[in-house]
Amino acid sequence: MRPTFSLRRLLTVVAVLAIALFIWVVYPTAKAMRCNAAINDGRSDPYQLVDRPTGSAAFLHYESATTKTVTAQLLKRSWNDILHGQRRFAATVTWYADGDQYDRQHTVVIRATPLGYQLERWQESSVPHVTKAPAGSSN
């Protein structure tokens, strides 16, 4: 018996494969890029994505901080990310109060999946405060 060739079946299989690849690979990347842009523009907080509390209840001296910065960046895609249909990005929340010797810093790694966001890990640390020299001065 000779197998029958159907153009309709071939187009259906190609369309289903394209939709599956979009959902599994492209959609998590688009979600992660959109969140990175929102976090870097100040429109979103990384902890809002994963339902974690923020503010003075969660962060030491956060409300009294004079300088607060939030940055986000996509992490390199690994084979594990492709196999699990996810895209990871890191967000760093740094704050400083005048007179402190150390900046407080939270580094958060979040996974964007087709179904939502998951907190992969977070790390709190203190980093030495570095004051920037005024422009034009030399040491």
Image (cartoon, grey):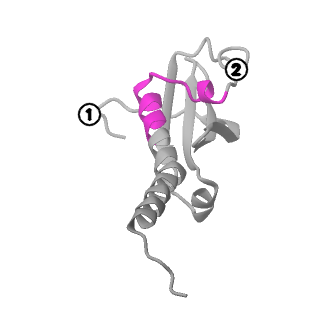
The quarter in which the C terminus is drawn is: top left
Q: Secondary structure at mark 1?
A: loop
The disc, 2 or 1, on the residue closer to the chain's N-terminal end is: 2
Q: Main secondary structure of the magenta part?
A: helix
Residue 138 screen position, x and y as percent = 32, 39
Residue at 69% from the left image edge and 14% from the top image edge = 56
Number of marks in picture: 2
**Residue 81 appears left or right of 41:** right
Question: Farthest left residue?
Answer: 136
Label 1 crowd (10 A; few <14 / some 14-19 / many >=20): few
**What amino acid is at disc 2?**
Pro
Residue at 57% from the left image edge and 43% from the top image edge = 114
| Quarter assignment of residue 107 | top right
- Magenta region: which residues? 33-50
**Residue 53 appears left or right of 17:** right
Residue 89 screen position, x and y as percent = 54, 44
| Quarter assignment of residue 116 | top right
Q: Secondary structure at mark 2?
A: loop
Q: Name the foreground residue: 17 vs 59.
A: 17
Question: Farthest top residue?
Answer: 64
Residue at 48% from the left image edge and 34% from the top image edge = 35
Q: Which residue is mark 2?
A: 53
The numbered mark at residue 116 is none
For marks 2 and 1, give the CA distance: 42 Å
Residue 79 screen position, x and y as percent = 58, 64
Q: Is residue 97 magenta?
A: no
Residue 51 screen position, x and y as percent = 68, 25
Q: Which residue is mark 1?
A: 136
